[in-house]
Amino acid sequence: MGKTRSLRVRLLLAATLVLFVFLGLMGLLLDGAFRRSAEQSVQERLLLHVYGLLAASDERDGALIMSEEIQEPRFNRLGTGLYGIVLDADGAELWRSPSAVDLDIDVADLMLMSRDFTAGTGYFDRLHDARQHLLFYFGYRVLWQGTDASHTAYTYLVLEDSGPYESEVSAFRNSLWGWLLTVSLALIVVQAVIMNWGLMPLRKLANDLKAIEDGHQDHLEGDYPLEIDGVARNLNLLLSNERQQREKYRTTLTDLAHSLKTPMAIIKAATLKNPATDPHDDKVKILDEQVMRMDEIISWQLEHAVTRPSKLIRKAIDVSPVAERLVAAMQKVYAEKGIEIILKVENTGFFGDERDFLELLGNVLDNACKYSNGLVSMTIEQKLPLAGMAGNLVVTIEDNGTGILESNRQSVLERGARLDSRESGQGIGLSVVAEIVDRYGGSIKIDDSELGGAKITIRLP
């Protein structure tokens, strides 16, 4: 069985277990205490009935005489469940009440009940009749003093059916466990409400972190309880330091790139664009190729470093102006080819870094323009996520070029892979796109386009 990941559920289960154990033990103790109290009540009641039989007794000429009518009415009629019996010193029955006419008790049990014990004392116990009905009984031994100063021993027995006792215990038990169950359910609900209220600051902390991740706020806001206030302050400090380090890192790499680009431009101007230089010379071609390679490596390393978005500093971006700006730039770059770019953008947004989104669109659109035969289509829209795919924001870029063979579609997403050696570049554009998409938890797919060329579909959350 897997462990639950909800802190609220774990606390509620633990509290419920403790509650049931406590109330269960308390119920057992109360049930036992009530049964002992009920037995004590039966014992006291039977002793009073013994006193009643003693009051109705007399002795004449050494013989025990009982009143024809006992004061307790239940002794005088059948079916009342209360029985009276008087035994002599040897355990022989001398008298039984009218209610005990049909009482069937083993003689051995009667002898046992008349066992020797001190006169003036009683004993309380239980037994079963011949029909296995449980009976409570109380025995009391007396010494009757005759007129000649002689003493005769008698044992007075009062028996009562256990039915009333069992009914009383059963009624109490049903009421007890019913109330305990009701109280348990009520306490569980109260505990759930208390835990929900107690864990509310953690839920607020999680919501604030999600808002930071989605770019709706820059730091944790609001008052938190003392227990998590320190965590919130440390997280805010961490976020602040992370932003500063990231900006410093970007600034440093940007300065480095510009510093290297200037010498590269000088090398190009001094060697490759010199009128005295023969462009068909093999050494010039090699130098030209390596200079271009170094230029692209510098650009790619810069892009690779500064396009690592931290999910903690995303911001909401309107994609429409970004896409329009990019399309205008591409039409200028490929003006000689007369590229027609069809742009369709829904009113949608992207949560992330604008430079990441610009780099992603720019690389894919640049490749489409580079390898097209004059027509490129870019559609950006909002769609429901598909099964097994990421997604809400869907970018589709198509061209009317030669397309990409299915066997090559995975390799073009790897760094350094190029399918057309006639075009400049080192094959790192789509690898940058793949890395950006992966970091944002998205997906990229290459298909055949209805325009005749390649169709690249990017889905981003």
Image (spheres, helix red, strand yellow):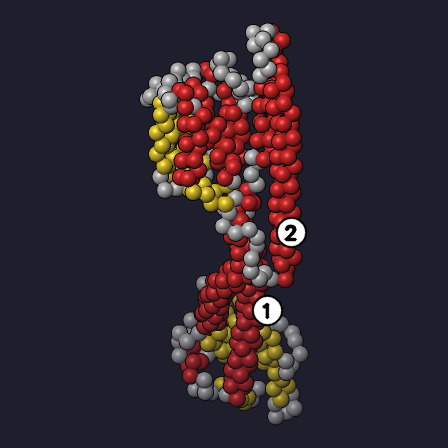
Q: Gap between marks 1 and 2, in whole Å? A: 87 Å
**Which of 168 and 353 lies nearest the eye of the viewer?**
353
**Which of 285 and 12 lies nearest the eye of the viewer?**
285
For numbered disc 2, what is the local secondary structure? helix
Q: Is residue 161 left or right of residue 151?
A: left
User: What kind of residue is marked 1?
Assistant: Leu
Which residue appears at 38% of the width and 35% of the height? 380
User: What kind of residue is marked 2?
Assistant: Leu
Which residue appears at 53% of the width and 46% of the height? 213
For numbered disc 1, what is the local secondary structure? helix
Which residue appears at 50% of the width and 64% of the height? 190
Q: Residue 128 at x, y = what percent?
A: 51, 65
Q: Is residue 285 left or right of residue 360?
A: right
Q: Which mark is residue 112?
A: 1
Residue 40 location, quadrant: bottom right
Quadrant of the frame with the N terminus: top right
Which residue was labeled with disc 2? Answer: 237
